[in-house]
Image (spheres, rainbow, N blue to C red):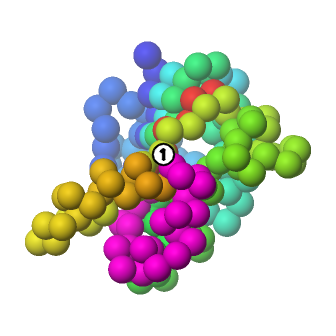
Amino acid sequence: MKKLHIGCGKTILPGYVNLDMQLLPGVDVVQDLEKFPYPFKDGEFDLIEAHQVLEHIHDLQGVMKELARILKKGGVLKIDVPHFTSNTAWMDPTHVRYFAYTTFDFFVRGHFHDEGYVYSTEYFSAIKKYLRFYKGWYLHYYLLEPIINKLIKVGNGHLYEGNFLRSFFPAWRVDVKLIK
């Protein structure tokens, strides 16, 4: 199984090809994610992980297309990004975009909002999503996280994100698994 960790920074994952835009200790491939194509063959990876990196990307469509290109059919792309209600989404001046529960649906065939846009139907075949809440000393989030993740599926995010719940109980991040 060949695995790629993009935007790894100083978090080097053993058994992965670790990619970052800076040559740091443990980085295997230096690559700006917004410069295409990446130095990999079509369908080269079984698993690609992107942790807290896509919020720094201007050309999300281009990056998603390139990640789909280098992922094998049936391969998995794991992503976690800050949710738009999280204070961490807004406090980092290097963040250029913010994410909702449904953001990555647009890269999946037949998604909830599919209106035939080219970018929305050619990259992935399935998606699994989960909202994470920063817990720390906020004990109520241990109980609320599974409840909100059941509620959010009603209306594909709108029951939580489209009303007061998002203000009273801000999410921390969105975890996404896309299958090619």
- Residue 29's spot in the image, x, y percent? 50, 41
Work out whether residue 35 can be spotted: no
- Which residue corresponds to the image point at 29% horizontal and 32% vertical from the top-left? 14
Q: Nearer the viewer, residue 119 or 10?
A: 119
Q: Looking at the rendering, which quadrant does residue 17 occupy?
A: top left
The reply, left or right, for residue 101 in relation to residue 124 is left
Asked if residue 71 is among those painted magenta in the image, a careful observer would answer no
| Above or below, 150 relative to 45 | below
For the record, the magenta segment spans 153-174
State how many labels appear.
1
- Crowdedness of circle 1 by 10 Å Cα count: few (<14), some, many (20+)? some
Q: Looking at the rendering, which quadrant does residue 179 occupy?
A: top right
Determine the secondary structure under disc 1. Answer: strand
The reply, left or right, for residue 111 in relation to residue 137 is right
- Residue 73's spot in the image, x, y percent? 64, 19
* Quarter of the figure that contains the N terminus: top left
Amino acid type at mark 1: Lys
- Which residue corresponds to the image point at 79% horizontal and 46% vertical from the top-left? 114
- Which residue corresponds to the image point at 42% horizontal and 74% vertical from the top-left? 165
Work out whether residue 163 can be spotted: yes
| Above or below, 3 relative to 178 | above
The reply, left or right, for residue 161 in relation to residue 64 is left
Q: Which residue is mark 1?
A: 129
Q: Nearer the viewer, residue 168 or 100?
A: 168
- Which residue corresponds to the image point at 58% horizontal and 53% vertical from the top-left? 156
| Above or below, 50 relative to 140 | above
Residue at the top extreme? 1
- Residue 161's spot in the image, x, y percent? 52, 69
* Quarter of the figure that contains the C terminus: top right
- Residue 117's spot in the image, x, y percent? 86, 48
Asked if residue 166 is among those painted magenta in the image, a careful observer would answer yes
